Every structure is written in structure tokens, then in C-alpha cells.
Image (tube, rainbow, N blue to C red):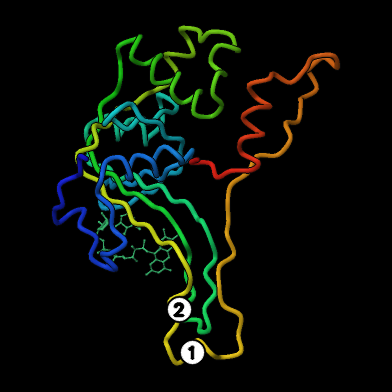
């Protein structure tokens, strides 16, 4: 098992028992997320930008318009912090103080660079597309050079990370547990609904099987499973 070194930057201080530093656990949380938030600072002003995220081994991938401030800043090697969060349940206690959320979250640190090599860039974009919908890449027209040029890809070697996970029931005070209030968890999960064709889809065109399979998988199980 490989773990991220625990340093002043990534050491979970509050409720340290919920901390995870194991690569596999951190990456499972990252990979289960379609979206991340990229945090960075320019001239003393913090920005936290929501965007899609993908991964290639120990490298986190971001993409966007080549003109995007986030892409240009992250691609210039400035330090960034990327977070992802999954909410797994609403935890209802007998007191407001002990209400909580079951969650998995990860914070990843690194400095990125712009991917300029054509094949590397295409591979990164393949990873983003596959993450949205596996098998999609082979069922769409290829990218044009113009589209490739307009898209900036940033590769961020992950040099530090932490994750935090809460599971289970409320942690009520002992003297509260017999109070006449309901306590427990409302589980939450992310699901996909039926695909809706746009007006250009011919009436006799079937929905691709890989798409239906993907939707079916995410109706009944958690996204990360
Ligand atoms: C969905 C959700 C809801 C939450 N709601 C609340 C809330 O309402 N109030 C509250 O106080 N806290 C909440 N938390 C926990 C919160 O994220 C922080 O862990 C906590 O507030 C401690 O903050 P701190 O500044 O003392 O962090 P510290 O423990 O000082 O953080 C030190 C380092 O630990 C790591 N770390 C800390 N928190 C996390 C995390 N969540 N995920 C991954 N790495 C982490 C980072 O690397 C960070 O730099 C919530 C978390 C989630 C995911």
C-alpha cells in the first residue's frame, strides 16, 4: 500500500480519525467525482473554480478553453489545490450540534504544466470523455486540429493529498439517545435518469447500448461502485 507523506500541508488536524492518505483510497474518491474545485490565488485573491477532472496514474488532469484563466494559471506551474466531495448521507442526531453529513472528500496539491504534445493531449481528452461516458470516444467524430488548439490541458503531478471520510450513525451525547426524537441517516447517492434525445436524433435511431448500460448501472448502485 502506498501512501502520501503526511506533512504540515496535508495532515488532517480536526477529527484525524477520519483521515486517509492511502493512494488507492484517495484516488477512488477522486475517480468517483466528475467535478472538482480548483483553488488558486492570484495577487492575494483566492479563486475556487468548478470544473471537470480526470486522472492518469499519479497525475491529475484539468482541461478547458486555452484562454481560460484557470487553465493558464494552473498550466504555468503555480501551486493549486484541487478538492472533490461526495455526500453520502444526511446524519440526523437528537441535537442540532450533532447533525452531520456522511461524506468522502479529497484534497490534492500540486503544480501543473500545459500538455503540448499532440498524442498526450488527445489521450487526456480521451480520459475526460470516457469519464463522462465509457465507450463514448469511439462513437463520436474525431477532434479537429482547431478544436485541439482551442482546448488547454493541464497535467498536475499529485505531490501531496489527503482524504477524509465520515460514515455511520449520529454521534449523539449519551444523555440524548433516549430523547423522543428520531435519529439516524438518510442515505444519499447520485443517479442517472433516462437519456433524452435532442431534436436532431432521427426517430428510428436507437439509444446506444453502452449508454443504456451506463445509465442502468448508475440507477441502482453508487457512482463509485
Ligand atoms: C460534505 C462536507 C461537509 C462538511 N461540513 C462541515 C461543517 O459544516 N463544519 C465543519 O467544521 N466541517 C465540515 N466538514 C469538514 C471540513 O471539510 C474540514 O475537514 C473541517 O472543517 C476541518 O477544517 P480545518 O480547517 O480545521 O482543517 P484541518 O484539519 O486543519 O486541515 C488540515 C489539512 O487536512 C486536510 N483536510 C482537512 N479537511 C479535509 C477534508 N474534508 N477532505 C480532505 N482533506 C481534508 C487538508 O489537506 C488540510 O490542509 C465537512 C466536510 C464535508 C466533505
Say whether mark 1 is within 8 Å of ligand 1: no
Position of 35 with respect to 180 (left or right) is: left
Where ligand 1 lies, by quadrant?
A: bottom left
Q: Residue at x 39, y 16 (%)?
A: 123
Circle 2: element type: helix
Choose between 117 and 107: the one closer to the eye: 107
Residue occupied by mark 2 = 98
Residue 47: % across, % down: 36, 49
Mark 1 and mark 2 residues within 8 Å of each other at the beta carbon: yes
Residue lying at 32% horizontally and 61% vertically, measured from the top left = 18
Q: In the drawing, does residue 156 fall left or right of residue 61?
A: left
Instruction: Tally the marks.
Output: 2
The image position of residue 145, as x and y in percent, is 46, 7
How far apart marks 1 and 2 lie (CA) works out to 10 Å
Reply above or below: 97 against 164: below
Q: Residue 176, labelled with which disc?
A: 1
Q: Residues within 10 Å of mark 2 (few under 14, many from 20)?
A: some
Front residue of 148/179: it is 179
SS label for mark 1: helix
Amino acid at each position: 500500500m502506498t501512501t502520501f507523506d503526511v506533512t504540515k500541508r496535508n495532515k488532517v488536524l480536526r477529527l484525524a480519525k477520519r483521515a486517509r492518505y492511502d493512494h488507492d483510497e484517495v484516488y477512488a474518491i477522486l475517480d468517483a467525482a466528475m467535478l472538482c474545485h480548483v483553488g488558486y490565488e492570484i495577487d492575494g485573491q483566492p479563486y475556487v473554480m468548478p470544473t471537470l477532472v480526470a486522472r492518469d496514474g499519479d497525475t491529475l488532469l484539468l482541461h478547458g478553453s486555452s484562454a481560460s484563466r484557470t487553465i493558464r494559471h494552473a498550466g504555468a506551474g503555480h501551486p493549486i489545490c484541487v478538492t472533490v466531495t461526495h455526500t453520502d448521507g444526511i446524519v440526523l442526531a437528537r441535537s442540532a450540534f450533532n447533525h452531520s453529513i456522511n461524506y468522502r472528500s479529497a484534497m490534492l496539491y500540486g503544480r501543473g504544466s500545459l500538455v503540448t504534445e499532440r498524442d498526450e493531449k488527445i489521450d487526456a481528452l480521451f480520459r475526460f470523455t470516457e469519464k463522462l461516458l465509457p465507450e463514448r470516444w469511439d462513437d463520436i467524430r474525431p477532434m479537429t486540429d482547431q478544436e485541439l488548439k482551442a482546448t488547454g490541458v493541464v497535467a498536475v503531478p499529485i505531490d501531496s493529498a489527503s482524504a477524509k471520510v465520515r460514515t455511520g450513525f449520529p454521534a449523539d451525547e449519551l444523555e440524548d439517545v433516549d430523547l423522543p426524537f428520531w435519529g439516524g441517516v438518510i442515505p444519499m447517492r447520485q443517479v442517472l435518469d433516462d437519456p433524452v434525445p435532442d431534436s436532431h436524433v432521427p426517430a428510428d435511431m436507437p439509444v446506444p447500448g453502452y449508454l443504456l448500460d451506463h445509465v442502468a448501472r448508475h440507477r441502482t448502485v453508487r457512482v463509485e461502485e
